[in-house]
């Protein structure tokens, strides 16, 4: 029924804001976790996110397809948090960090963006859908091929979602600015 995109920098408060939006829908929430807890520092961040979520929310781990998380969600709010870690996992799974290759990155980008387009379409059938993403382009251009690819894919993905979203909100220092 509606798609909301919540963007912001690292530690900006975007996840907390998106969680409030999800709670305010009054719908049961399906939380789609995209971060990999293998790294101890990331595991600590994941645990902090888990601790503040209501116990009645259903949490699923994102797979290669984010759009699958929106299946059978007509009576749910689906909260996808977040786009950046999901893209990084795609790149890692494809082996891009071990052997950076332009052709590989182009194939991965095409697959990711096709699924992002499906997320935007599938969101129309959900009770509500909220996607959290890092704001691309706020810093320097990364010097290495894979980090640049991550940033390019993230930027294109957020633009595609924003073009279909009913609302786009930028979170900076815990404050929210509605962009549209």
Image (tube, helix red, strand yellow):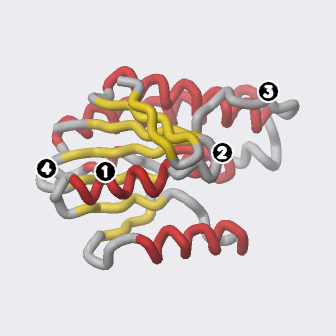
Q: Position of residue 90 (x, y in %)?
A: 59, 47
Q: Position of residue 160 (x, y in %)?
A: 43, 24
The residue tagged 1 is 21
Residue 141: give its label. 3
The secondary structure type at the circle numbered 1 is helix
Can you tell which of label 1 and label 4 is closer to the viewer? 1
The residue tagged 2 is 91
N-terminal-most mark, 1 or 3: 1
The residue tagged 4 is 74
N-terminal-most mark, 1 or 4: 1
Q: CA distance from mark 2 to mark 3?
A: 18 Å
Can you tell which of label 1 and label 3 is closer to the viewer? 1
N-terminal-most mark, 2 or 1: 1
Residues under numbered marks 4 and 3 in contact, where contact means CB atoms less than 8 Å apart: no
N-terminal-most mark, 4 or 2: 4
Identify the residue shown where x is 45% and y is 57%: 16
- Circle 2 crowding by C-alpha within 10 Å: few under 14, some 14–19, many from 20: many
User: In this rendering, is residue 25 above or below 146?
Assistant: below
Q: Is residue 34 left or right of residue 69?
A: right
The secondary structure type at the circle numbered 4 is loop
Residue 93 seen in this snapshot: yes
Identify the residue shown where x is 44% and y is 33%: 177
Q: Where, by quadrant of the figure, is residue 44 drawn?
A: bottom right
């Amino acid at each position: 029924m509606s798609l909301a995109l919540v963007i912001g920098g690292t530690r900006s408060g975007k996840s907390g804001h998106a969680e409030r939006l999800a709670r305010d829908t009054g719908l049961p929430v399906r939380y789609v976790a995209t971060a990999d807890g293998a790294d101890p520092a990331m595991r600590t961040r994941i645990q902090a996110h888990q601790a503040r979520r209501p116990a009645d929310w259903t949490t699923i781990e994102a797979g290669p397809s984010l759009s699958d998380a929106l299946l059978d969600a007509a009576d749910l709010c689906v909260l996808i948090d977040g786009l950046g870690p999901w893209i990084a996992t795609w790149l890692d799974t494809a082996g891009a960090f071990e052997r950076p290759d332009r052709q590989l990155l182009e194939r991965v980008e095409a697959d990711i963006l096709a699924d992002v387009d499906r997320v935007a379409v599938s969101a129309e059938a959900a009770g509500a859908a909220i996607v959290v993403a890092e704001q691309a382009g706020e810093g320097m251009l990364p010097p290495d091929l894979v980090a640049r690819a991550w940033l390019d894919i993230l930027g294109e993905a957020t633009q595609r979602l924003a073009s279909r979203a009913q609302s786009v909100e930028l979170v900076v220092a815990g404050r929210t600015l509605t962009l549209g």
